[in-house]
Image (cartoon, grey):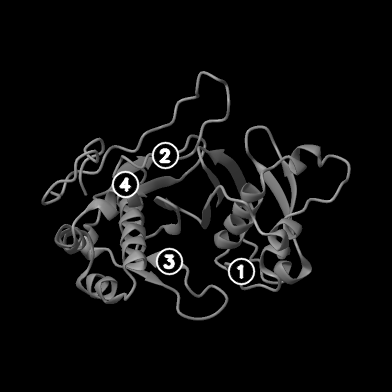
Amino acid sequence: MTAPGSAARTPAHPAPAAAPHPRRARPPATGRPVPPVVLDAARPLWLGRPPGTPLTLAVVSLTWLRALSAPDRRALAGRHLTQEEAAFGAALPVPKRRTEWLAGRLALKSAVRAHQRYRLRCAATPGGRLPVRTLADGLRAGKPYVAAPVEVALTHAGDFAVAACGPRPVGVDLERHRTVTPYLARLLTVPDGPGTERLRRMPLTLRWAAKEAVLKHYGFGLRIGGGAREVELTGWAHDGRFTWRPSAALADHLPYDGGRTVCLAQDIDNYSFAMVWQT
C-alpha cells in the first residue's frame, strides 16, 4: 500500500511500502476523550495502538481505493493477498463489493502485521502468506480469523474499513451518521429510569454501533434471538466507555473465561465507532 500522506495523488502503479508506525493517540487540547481511530479519507492506511488497550487498529480508506484504476487494484491485491484470496475477490460480481472486500482484507492484514511487529515484537508475516479466513458454520459463521496467536475483527462503513487485532476476542463496529428508520429508533430506545439520563443522550447510530460491537466481540453478529435486542445498554460514561447486559437468550451462549470486557463507543467526525475487547 502507498505510504500515508500520498493519497492526494493516485500513483500509476502503487508501490509497496513499509507500513507506518502505529501511532499512540495524544489527548486533544479540548480535553475530550481521545478518539481510538483516525478517519481520514485522504490517508490510504492509518495504524494505531489505542492507549490503555492491548489492541492494534488499522483503517483503510475506501476513497483512496476507489480512485485506483482496475490494474492498480489488481497489482495491490497481487502483493498483499494470497492467490486464493485474489481469485475470490476478482470473482465477486458487484464492483462495490469487490472494493469493500479488498479494503477489509488489507485492513485485517495490516492490523495483524503491525500487531506482530510492535506488540509481539516478532517478524511480520507477509500479506501473501497470511490468509484471512472466516468460520463457515454455527453461530459464529462469518467471523474472520488468521493462523496466528491473535484475534481479529472487521467493520466497514462509508469511506472506511476498520480492523482490530489483539490477544483476546475483540469486536468493532463503524456506522455512518444517518437518520434511522422508525423501527430501528424504537429498537434503540432507552427506557426512562435512574441513571439513564446520559445514556438517553447517546446518538442512535452510536447505540447501534455499541450493540453490534458487543455481538461481534462474541462472534455472533445478529444471529442470536432478536439480534440487537439481545444487548441492553445500561450506561455510557463521559470517556466513552459503556456498560450493557445480555438477554437470557444471549446469556445462554456467552462463554466464560474469566476475562474482563471493556467497551468503548464514541462519535468520530461523521461516524459512530464502538469497540469491545478483553483485558
| Earlier-in-chain disc, 3 versus 4 | 4
Q: Position of residue 197 (x, y in %)?
A: 81, 38
In the image, 13: left or right of 167? left
Kindly identify the amino acid type of the residue bearing the numbered disc 2: Arg
Residue 244 x, y percent position in the rendering: 72, 52
Q: Which residue is mark 4?
A: 114
Please identify the quarter of the rendering in which residue 216 is found.
bottom right
Q: CA distance from mark 1 to mark 2?
A: 28 Å
Mark 1 touches mark 4? (CB < 8 Å)? no
SS for callout 4: helix
- Amino acid tagged 1: Leu
Rounded to the nearest angstrom, the CA distance separating label 1 from label 4 is 29 Å
What's the residue at 53%, 72% (across, down)? 140
**Can the viewer see residue 260 in this picture?**
no
Q: Which residue is mark 1?
A: 222
The residue sitting at 64% across, 40% down in the picture is 241
Rendered location of residue 42, percent (x, y):
31, 40
